[in-house]
Image (cartoon, helix red, strand yellow):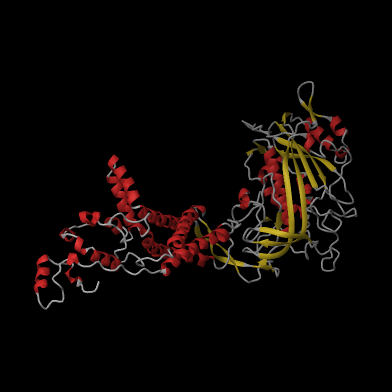
Amino acid sequence: MAGHDYSYVGASAEDIALESKNPHSDVSATKVHSAEPAAPAPRSRYLSRTLVLLFVPAFITAYYYWIWLYLLNRELDDAYKYGSRNEVWVFWSWFIVGVFALDWAAHGLVGVEVAMLETPFFQAPHLIGLFEHSEKTWSGVGGWFRCLTKCIRERNLKGITGMYKSLKTYKLWYLLAFVTLSLYVGLPLSGLTMELSEGYIPNDETPEVVGRSSIDWHSRYNLNGEPIYNRAGNSWKVGSPAMLPGISIIYTQEHVNRGDIEVLKESPNTLPTGPEMPDMFFIPQAEAPVSGRSWGMRATYNCSIVKDVSEFTIIGHYKGSNCYAGRGAVDQDCVNGYFTEGAGNLWSYQEVAGSMQNTYNTVDGVATYDDNQPDPFAPGNSTQPDVFEYAMWQVRTIASYHEVEDFNNTLGSTVAGLDTPFMKASNGSWVADEAYFAARNYTHFSQIGSKVAQKFRIGLAPLDVAAPIGVRCVVRSALGSADVDPSSSSYSGFIREHPTNYTDKRIDMPGPYSRLGFQVEQFLREATVSSVFTSLSIRATKGDNNGVNLLKFATSDELQRSMTLAYGKELLQMVYDGQYSFEDSWQHDGLKGSRKAKVLTAGDVPPLAAVIPMGIWTLMSMVFAIVYGFRRRVADSLSGFSLFRLGVRYGDQLGPEVFTAKEANEVARLWQLPGTLDKM
């Protein structure tokens, strides 16, 4: 390069000739185009861009994968959204990463671009092909748009063959564009996979809670002479929501998919009324989610519709004397019959049966929680759980004033094979089957057979006697402690712990508090058909001058849901006294509270949709960096100075059209000169 003045590049021939004639000029009279070839530029390794390309995409994708794995894919209860303190910063940090990621991606690729252009496979066939890489047109929307519009303009066979030739000629350009496009697709999608939602984050405060503790469990008192069980029964009759006080979180086991249970999908949780009941844990409730270990009640009660008498284990099989399950020294199956007036045009006869293992050995005692009760949740425990069975016969009579038109006789599933206490006489009228009552000793005590028979003799002849509908409930419950996880509203590590004994001086009660299911038997045995409707807030009555008539029979599904709700009402009474205010709240030292805040939750787009394109970008970037990034090359990148050197070396081979052309592809000579980089 020594001995040449490159100020002549681009000068007119006359100017060059004049200078050549100047005796004081340092430039020899030899023509410029006959100058000696310049030595090639030294080749070096440029590691900074290679390291960026090798590690930055891997870090960005790994960071997003961590967000997906630990924050977006966690077991989070969508009803309450309990997260950690730093999730909001993770959310904003990802958007900061997204701002710089596109620039980092191009920064690393332009380095290996030079090394790849030096290989025979990716070498540009001419200078025009090389110039396509000069402005990183493959790294942005502008270059992609120009390529796309060119394809659209040539919508014919020539355009298709031209596109194939273009792919072959500019394969490196398309390859780098594909890698960059993967990131352009992945980053926006990643932003749609996450969002900030209203939720809760932990704090270090001891929460105020409402609900029973192990110390005051047996401290129960009648109010104004009203029996304790009446409170749950009254709440059931009026159809009040089966909701817990405070934040109202029902804890389930970790494997339970709460999204499949309708009443647990939203806040506040309410007690399920469906036939499938999960294993639940109830603790004193705060006004926000809590974490830690607490004492409470573990319970599950499954009430199913009976379709055949064989599904009953007591009703239809037991014919002994009457007794009450869970009361006194009784530890056997018990059945009782009851007659109730449902409304002016409908009454019912129901048989109520129960089997509740009673370990309390005095006549006035009730089944309770103590050391003599086998653990109902123990693995492999074959102990018979508490059972409650209910069969109902509904009898429609003539209304006293206005008859109900279009009375709905739908019953749903009925109990096949169950003996009936009613029969048709020879004249076609309905009468009580005296033999049915005579064969069952449990009807004698209440003289229920006489009461039913009298109902047929008072002149209100039955219009219809419905087939029996029945429900059977299997109940398991225990008191103890467990760890609660507010993020998934789950509990674990349950250990049975019985409450302070009722004989303790701090309690001083005459007897223990009953086990779950005892109160249900008390108030359901004399419940009317109208109560079934009101408990579910079903409008099935019509008033007339002399009272209220019913518009339909109760169905088996309604009876099942009503009985399940009855258990929920008893449970709420047992654990929370049916109270919802925090006037009698107390500090729970075993729990930590939380406060409202923004938490990171999954968005509308699944994270896999973002991981795939980002994974492609990362993998290909790392391959390029390893295969081409550590090679010696003529320049760090196709910078302006690199292309200037190239232009100087080819200056004597270009004609004047290079100064008048608007675009490089208009210069014919540029299509003929090789696109190698050894001239740089």
Using the image as rendered, state which of residue 360 and residue 456 is in the foreground: 360
Residue 321's spot in the image, x, y percent? 89, 41
Q: Nearer the viewer, residue 146 or 173?
A: 173
Identify whether 528 is placed above or below 380.
above
- What is the quadrant of the N terminus in the image? bottom left
The percent coordinates of residue 473 (x first, y second) are 75, 44
Total numbered circles: 0
Q: Position of residue 310 (x, y in %)?
A: 79, 35
- Name which quarter of the figure residue 76 lies in: bottom right
User: Residue sitting at 29 percent across and 40 percent down?
Assistant: 157
In the picture, measured across the screen, residue 431 lies left or right of residue 160, that is right
- Answer yes or no: is residue 667 visible: no
Tell me if 572 is positioned left or right of 146 in this view.
Answer: right
Residue 298 visible, this orientation: yes
Quarter of image, res 155: top left
Q: Residue pushed farthest bottom?
A: 24
Indicate the quadrant where residue 375 lies: bottom right
| Side (left or right) of 330 relative to 461 | right
List x then y, in percent, for residue 162. 30, 45
